Image (spheres, grey):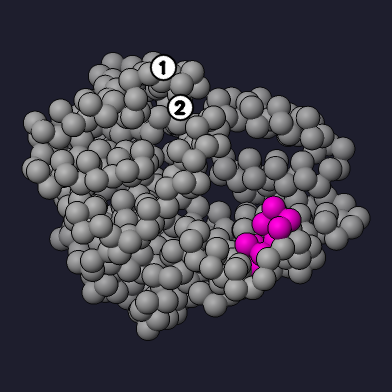
Amino acid sequence: PSLRRVRAKCFWAVGEREAGLAALREAAASGDARSVYQLVRALVDLGRLDEARGEADKVRQSNRMAASLVSLCRAVIELAALDLDKAAQHGKDAVDEDPSSAEALRILTSIEVTRLETARAWTALETLERHRKFRKVVASVALSRARLTIFGQMLNEFDLHPQVTERARDLLRSPPGDGVDGLRVEVAREPGHTGVAIAYLIASRRAGRLAKTVDAMVTEGGSSIPRIVHQYWSDKELPPDVERAIAATRQGAGAAEHRLYDTAAVRSFLLRYHSTVVQRAFRLAMEPARRADIFRLAVLAAVGGVYVDADDLCLTYVDGFLPNGAGLVVGQERLGTIANNVIAAAPRHPVIVAALEEASEAMLHYSNESIWLATGPGLLTRHVAHYLATSADHGADVAVLTDVEMTRAFAMHMPMRHKKSSADWRRGGSGRTRRKTR
């Protein structure tokens, strides 16, 4: 089963989903609980939740590890269905059944962060850091290490404004549809609070207010998003795996123009289209990931188009991905946040312009927050939520696609060699920042 799981992972990484599923089904046929868990995760990624539930029910809970994995299956299914309370209970059951399971602790942490249950999230996160890679550490060291993770940075922010977090948490607990208007008020009042933004986006999705699919948004007016695909790699010389991914995306661009930039090309672009503030922000960004964050916003603000990370594969033609009538297309991640690895935008879209302004200010003020919060998905999450909550038409030109819809068009976050080095932002470039509240 373990070899079949590896084979499935290889298929999945290059976008061959059905071949990956077939390999996982072969692995799970033996009753191996780990293989069933991976199969359930794959089915959830494809939006096939009923099928995933059926596979989870087949597992023989012959020992505590198998019982934990079954609970974990149910946790990720309910998380995808946005039933956060059920997901949290299943996640807790998984940890109770196998307290040493790093995967169970990681899933439980992510669920509690999404629910804005800060105390429970801290407990799970500290336990995870204490047991990570089997290096048991004392509680004080685990807490210090936990605070430096992405989840730790998010929880630190939530704890800065406990009353705001508590109000958002209470509204998020409301039945679907009941808390959306209250959360919209909170987003308008607290535009710098990432937790409020996440709660509002989750509540909006549960209430059906983000259900603007590609088909639903088609109009005769066409899209204002230019057919240009932008990608960035810091050096002119591309690693072989990055080169293959970019070549696949270039092919997937179809009739759209494909533009690849290195650092020198980016500086020339910024000199032509942007102020010295943005140019300096890019120069001050030491980490490749932060430079990519600044540039993706800068190029979309100036000329528009589709920005695709270098580790993503385009599986369909860009014209099939862009809804007619949309001025901004983003993807919502499983935890309610807005991803920034693939963004499509019309030139000068207000969300992109505002996010670029805040990211540039963060760099110029030597801010002390993580890349994720200051220039990455956290930043985009706040600005998308604020635009949806405060614009006169509630963001009618914005398409917030589900992660399932996004994965139909892109194979995202492919495994690459540079991610195992200190060059990867998750390893060597937390780049902590202190954000100024807008």
The kind of secondary structure the magenta stretch mainly shows is helix
Task: Please say if 90 is above or below 47.
Answer: below
The answer to which of 146 and 356 lies nearer the viewer is: 146
Magenta highlight on residue 199: no
Residue type marked 2: Leu
113 relative to 54 in the view: left or right:
left
Numbered tag placed on residue 230 in the rendering: none
Q: Find residue 177 and report its horizontal and vertical position in percent.
A: 40, 69
Task: Please say if 173 is above or below 109.
Answer: below
373 relative to 391 in the view: left or right:
right
Q: How many marks?
A: 2
Task: Please say if 235 is above or below 53.
Answer: above
422 relative to 201 in the view: left or right:
right
Q: Residue furthest right?
A: 62
Q: Find residue 122 and report its horizontal and vertical position in percent.
A: 56, 72
Residue type marked 1: Ala
Which residue is drawn at the image coordinates 62% and 58% (left, top)?
106
Q: Return the residue at label 2.
A: 313
Numbered tag placed on residue 247 in the rendering: 1
Quadrant (top left/top right/bottom left/bottom right) for the N terminus: top right
The span from disc 1 to disc 2 (Cα, nearest Å) is 9 Å
Q: Find residue 90 and report its horizontal and vertical position in percent.
A: 68, 65
Instruction: Classify 10 Å Cα crowding around label 2: few (below 14), some (14-19), many (20 and above).
Output: many
The answer to whether residue 332 is seen in the rendering is no
Nearest to N terminus: mark 1 or mark 2? 1
Label 2: element kind? strand
The answer to which of 154 and 80 lies nearer the viewer is: 154
Q: Quadrant of residue 153?
A: bottom left
Magenta stretch, residue numbers: 127-135
Label 1: element kind? helix
Quadrant (top left/top right/bottom left/bottom right) for the C terminus: bottom left
The answer to which of 316 and 368 lies nearer the viewer is: 368
